[in-house]
Amino acid sequence: MINRSSRRQFVSFSALALALLMCAIPSRLAAAPKPLRILLITGGCCHDYARQKDILKKGLEERANVVVDQIHTDDKSTHPPLAILAHPDYANGYDLVIHDECGADISDPSTVEGVLKPHRDGIPGVNLHCAMHCYRIGNPNSPVTLGTPHGYWFEYLGLQSSGHGPQEPISIAFTDKGHPITQGLSDWTTIREEHYNNIHIFDTAHPIAHGKQTIKNESSSKTNDYVVAWVNEYGPKKTRVFSTTIGHNNTTVEDPHYLDLVTHGVLWATGHLNSDGTPAAGYGPAK
């Protein structure tokens, strides 16, 4: 039989334990990291962005603690009316912007500067495939002079590309196997894909993967070897930027090799990728 004194002690102990438990629950919840907010921009010429935007959103959100918001236009011209244009504050509140648009004829210098402003101010960027051929001011085949409008977008990317050849498989090899982005990833060969050329690689850029593509005709064979993935430090704040020229066809975009690479690029650019290629604590896939 429990006496009154023991009962009071038991009740007091239970109340204390309950109070501690109630305090601990919100503390644990507060410690859970918030998802990274990602802005994905798609639309313009030559690609199935209507499907690719959703493939990317699903693939990234499955692989990392991120929430992907989308700005998309179904316009398929080389001058798509992207909602970010003339709005240099378009990335406010976001941790990173993914440029996956294709607008080669958006060439007004003040417009391009507006697109670049968030990155110049320190918001990291990831650039996929045709983003390399966007926002061209002047002849894209002419090597860039630093500080001129012709170089605005290429300086942000860290690499100047002007075009591609026919679609053939690309053999991708990670050339810096010690970089956090390449850790845990394996070389692979794509389906028939566009292989972008390299006109100039800037001193601020660091290649991490090359791609080889063999083009054959009736009388000859040629193999092109170009950088296909790299990182860059952009502007006075040395903003982190990751880019890959791969990603024309839906089958490539939904390939786990590709989605893993882009995810690593997102986490590296935002400072949430460990040196061994694993996500920082709390930023891996949901369990």
Image (cartoon, rainbow, N blue to C red):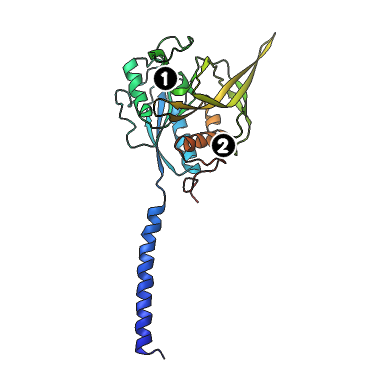
Name the residue: 35% across, 87% down.
Answer: 5
Could you say whether the residue bearing mark 2 is in a helix, strand or loop?
helix
Name the residue: 44% across, 32% down.
Answer: 53
Towards the viewer: 271 or 44: 271
Position of residue 140 measured from the top left corner of the image (x, y, whole percent):
46, 12
Which three-letter amino acid code belongs to the residue tagged 2? Pro
Q: Quadrant of residue 210?
A: top right
Towards the viewer: 42 or 234: 234
Q: Badge 1 local density, few (<14 within 10 Å), some, or many (20+)?
A: many
Which three-letter amino acid code belongs to the residue tagged 1? Trp
Q: Badge 2 local density, few (<14 within 10 Å), some, or many (20+)?
A: few
Position of residue 118 measured from the top left corner of the image (x, y, whole percent):
35, 29
Position of residue 183 measured from the top left corner of the image (x, y, whole percent):
59, 38
- In the picture of the structure, the residue carrying the numbered disc 1 is 153
Name the residue: 54% across, 43% down.
Answer: 278
Residue 194 image label: none
Could you say whether the residue bearing mark 1 is in a helix, strand or loop?
helix
187 in relation to 20, above or below: above
N-terminal label among 1 and 2? 1
Confirm whether residue 248 shows in the render: no
- In the picture of the structure, the residue carrying the numbered disc 2 is 256
Left or right relative to 39: residue 223: right
Confirm whether residue 283 shows in the render: yes
